[in-house]
Amino acid sequence: MQTRNALTAALLSTLLAAPAAFSQVDLQTQPVAAEAMQSTIEGEVMVVNTETRLMTLKTADGTYEVLHMPPEVKRLDEIKIGDMVSITETTTALIELQTGRDAGAMGAEGDTAVERAPGSSKPAGTITDDLTLYGKIVGVDKAAGTVQIKGAETTRTFPVEDKALLDELKVGDGVVAKFRNVISGAVTVK
């Protein structure tokens, strides 16, 4: 009877320990490029069309800009001719190289968050779009200075600015591109 209990205990300990061994992920991540861009447009509202979701601004230099307002802008009907509008768009990108047994997953995931500015009587807020793309290196051409990456839907060739990086890249490595686009806007009365 004791050997049966010892066998059961050994089997249980093996089964309980097995998921831990399989759950260990072999993945190292290294950032290889980052970039950020920001632009701002400010102007007086000249036209607001709630049906087409188009708004025309007259900027300080006298030019006109026609903007398409995304569906996330819920209070478009509260924006009036003569209001002043300021919109800032910030886009960031981070490219990471993944190595290890578990590198090279393919796919995409994204999320959009909308946040209304607290306490604002006029329309104001932020729309944040996050997108992460996963791919796998399927070719490295050191002579041409390029890397070929297979994504979920397509395979593309990209130039590599830092030629020293080509020595680190190998077929099977994963590539993760993270993009964030943040649009902040506020309406003020002229």
Image (tube, helix red, strand yellow):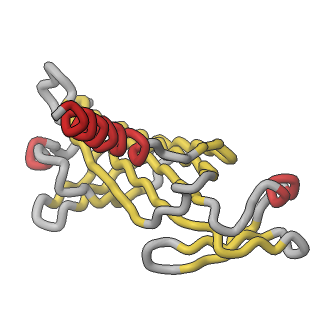
Above or below, 7 relative to 106: above
Q: Position of residue 36 (x, y in %)?
A: 58, 42
Residue shown at 34% from the left, 49% from the top: 129
Q: Where is residue 108 in the image (x, y as percent from the top left)?
A: 39, 62
Q: Position of residue 79 (x, y in %)?
A: 16, 43
In the rendered picture of this protein, how many numbered marks are placed on residues? 0
Left or right: 155, with 170 as reference point: left
- Asked whether residue 127 appears in the rendered view, the answer is no
**Residue 50 placement: quadrant:** bottom left
Left or right: 148, with 47 as reference point: right
Q: Residue at the top extreme?
A: 119
Above or below, 26 relative to 134: above
Please name whichever residue, 47 or 129, is drawn nearer the observer in this view of the structure: 129
Q: Residue at the right extreme?
A: 143
Left or right: 141, with 70 as reference point: right
Please name whichever residue, 84 or 94, is drawn nearer the observer in this view of the structure: 94
Residue shown at 28% from the left, 42% from the top: 11
Left or right: 18, with 49 as reference point: right
Please name whichever residue, 50 or 90, is drawn nearer the observer in this view of the structure: 90
**Residue 20 placement: quadrant:** top left
**Which image quarter is the C terminus in?**
top left
Q: Residue at the bottom extreme?
A: 154
Residue shown at 29% from the left, 60% from the top: 68
**Residue 145 placement: quadrant:** bottom right
Please name whichever residue, 47 or 173, is drawn nearer the observer in this view of the structure: 173
Q: Where is residue 168 in the image (x, y as percent from the top left)?
A: 79, 54
Residue shown at 69% from the left, 69% from the top: 171
**Which image quarter is the N terminus in?**
top left
- Asked whether residue 163 appears in the rendered view, the answer is yes
